[in-house]
Amino acid sequence: MGSDQALPEFSQYHDLKDDEKILYHPISILSPPSARHRGARNMGVLLLFSMLCALGLYVVVVTADSARSTTLGLNAPSLLFKLPKSWAQYSPYFPVEEYGDPPQHCRVTQVNIIQRHGARYPTSGSAKMIVAALNKLLSVEEFTDDRLNFLKDYNYRLGENDLLPFGARESQLAGQVHFTRYKHLVSHGQLPYYQQSKILSASNIVAIAGFSIASHHVYNPSLSLIISEKLNNTLHAEMCPNAGTAIAQTSEWLSKYGPAIAERLNRHAPGANLTSTDVFGLLSLCPFESVSLNRLSSFCKLFSESEFQQFEYSGDLDKYYNTGYGQPLGPVQGVGYVNELLARLTGTPVRDNTQTNRTLDASPVTFPLNRTIYADFSHDNQMIAIYAAIGLFKQHTAPDPSFPNPKRNWLASHLVPFSARMVTEKLACGRRGEEFVRIFVNDAMQPLEFCGAGKDGLCTLRAFVESQAYARNDGNGDFEKCYE
């Protein structure tokens, strides 16, 4: 786009298809008709209310025994929120495909979920970059394009790191989906086992609450374990001190697309002197402010669809070269989780010499092997490492930092949006109950060619375990390189 052109039109984001929209409803909780559950239900609501208030989430609880109903709503309005899918790891959750039910002769017998937190404020580092760019724009006395005039009375109001009500909704809906899909695995003696790395506890508690809500508070699981990030931790992506970063690749790509955008914006904001780094900060402000406001941020209107696609590629490169296949010590950071997954699938003790916590994994209290639903809460970078350790989303050629492949399937928005989740199902099939495995990432069934899966996505459990030789061999020596 030439520097003399006006800012691009943004009408395309107001004409998204139905499958590109997410509808958020107020949470409705119907009381169980049985009186013997009413006291437990009310106690569950009280405990949930206390937890959410303590975590800074706004809630309204109204009980009406005469109507036998309870309504709990997070402080975010019901709305049809149109969401572009080109915000990389900052994209709100959307299902990449429609979930496929098991084949008729199969039934799911165990589920292993690993999930990212819902939408949050920017990290302190991102916030610093955003504010630096904003200060340059806010110093401009006169803009030459009307679409920048909103900055004349603009106030930056974003916090740092904390979960947003929008993100709480994402997490809560995930919990509801998991109960609805796998309720046949739940009983009072068989509740989900939840554990988390110490990050955004509110998001995880709301996800658990969503599970309880979907069951009409018949089943009220709790957070079973919080693992310190100062100890060995399979849900934390900073356990390899010698691992490199993606700075070289993302900087190279930013140098390709950033200058033209900076030149255009500077022409319409005389004296701002925005750099490519500032451009990236302003692009990221679009998703962060949108999920904060529950409506499209005015900053989104400053960029075209193609420019957001360029922004997305920055996220794709970051994930690939930070903890993905492009980082020599990336996949090994997912090995510990994979070995714990294998232990759960096979009902055998964990065998691992990487970042597992042996004390926790050796105890049936902190690492039970007899549950039907396991749910772990983690980070986007760690989930990428886990994908790579398993062998998901392998690329024939590494992403080029100077030119994106339009046919690539390595898309951060598809892999680790806010509230992303990977679900590993164990199934029993046929009269003999032969055991199989299939994996979904954001509801997209993974092909699993590496263990002989067909169109149904099914690998035998034995073949899947055998396919995970990299994890079972502790990363083939890569973990030692983390500390050499």
Image (tube, rainbow, N blue to C red):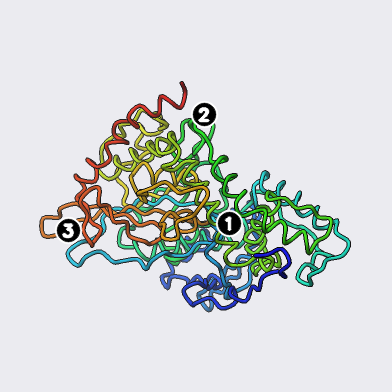
Compared across the picture, whether 120 is left or right of 93 comes to right
Image position of 474 (left or right of 173): left
Q: Quadrant of residue 287?
A: bottom right
Q: Residue at x 31, y 66 (%)?
A: 100
346 on left or right of 94: left
| Left or right of 182, for residue 456 | left
Mark 2 is surrounded, within 10 Å at the Cα level, by few (under 14), some (14 to 19) or many (20 or more) other residues, namely few
- Using the image as rendered, state which of residue 156 and residue 477 is in the foreground: 477
Q: CA distance from mark 1 to mark 2?
A: 28 Å
The 10 Å Cα crowd at callout 1, few under 14, some 14 to 19, many 20 or more, is many
x then y, percent, for residue 43: 52, 59
Image quadrant where residue 388 sits: top left
State whether residue 37 appears in this view: no
Q: Is residue 37 above or below residue 64?
A: above
Observer-side mark, 3 or 1, equals 1
Q: At numbered mark 3, what does the secondary structure look like: helix, strand or loop? A: strand
Q: Please give the label number shown on residue 148.
A: none
Q: Amino acid at mark 3?
A: Cys
Identify residue type, mark 1: Phe
The residue wearing badge 3 is 429
* Residue under numbered circle 1: 311
The CA span between labels 3 and 1 is: 44 Å
Q: Which is closer to the viewer, label 1 or label 2? A: 1
Does residue 131 sit above or below 265 in this rendering?
above
Please, what secondary structure does the residue beneath circle 1 have?
A: helix
Residue placed under numbered mark 2 in the picture: 241
Residue 347 visible? The answer is yes
Pointer 1 and pointer 2: residues touching (CB < 8 Å)? Answer: no
